[in-house]
Image (cartoon, grey):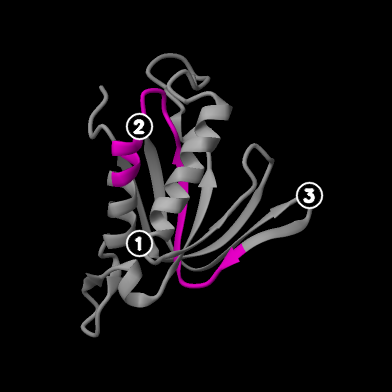
Amino acid sequence: MKVVIQKVSKAKVLVDGNLISEIGKGLVVLVCVEKEDNEKVLDWIAEKLVNLRIFPDEKGKFNLSLKEVGGEILLISNFTVCGFLKKGSRPSFHFAEVPEKAKLMLELLREKIKAKGISVKEGSFGAYMQISLINEGPVTLFIEYPLKRI
């Protein structure tokens, strides 16, 4: 699984010009479910997202988690995060899970995050989306499980 995380003050997603979801302070999380991902991976990712200390404390140091600041997650399925560019100029997406399985895994990830007390909003799986956000910092992180593929 590969995940791009952006700390935001607000974000929203539109499909065909219609507002699908929006959040205030929190994280926009772009997720690519990969072949061979399993529930252990989802547990690890959910734990990381909820406890990631990237929000400033009273001294401005990254010390607070999403839970501690009352933040939300905007969870977006994004198979292009798995784009593999080892050779050539056109990305290969052969590591990405097939859509039916990826959708189920993303739904399970959402439920695992919600079970930890975090509000989760979503995009529309498989749709062409327009995502607007205000990245705070900017803070953008990339995590992957397993931790190293190449």
Mark 3 crowd level (few <14, some 14–19, many ≥20, 10 Å Cα): few
Instruction: Classify 64 as above or below 21.
Output: below
Q: Which mark is residue 16?
A: 3
Q: Quadrant of residue 52?
A: bottom left
Residue in view at x 39 percent, y 59 percent: 115
Name the spot of residue 17 as percent of width and height, x first.
Answer: 78, 55
Q: Which mark is residue 146?
A: none
Under circle 1, the secondary element is: loop
Instruction: Classify 41 as above or below 60.
Output: above
Q: Which mark is residue 116?
A: 1
3 or 2: tag closer to the N-terminus:
3
Calculate the distance from the C-alpha at mark 3 to the C-alpha at mark 2.
Answer: 32 Å
Name the spot of residue 111 as percent of width and height, x first.
Answer: 45, 52
Residue in view at x 53 percent, y 39 percent: 78
Residue in view at x 52 percent, y 72 percent: 24
- Image quarter in which the N terminus is found: top left
Indicate the amino acid at tag 3: Asp
- Near-viewer residue (37 or 8): 37
Under circle 3, the secondary element is: loop
Q: Is residue 86 magenta?
A: no
Tell me whether circle 3 and circle 2 mark residues in contact (CB < 8 Å). Answer: no
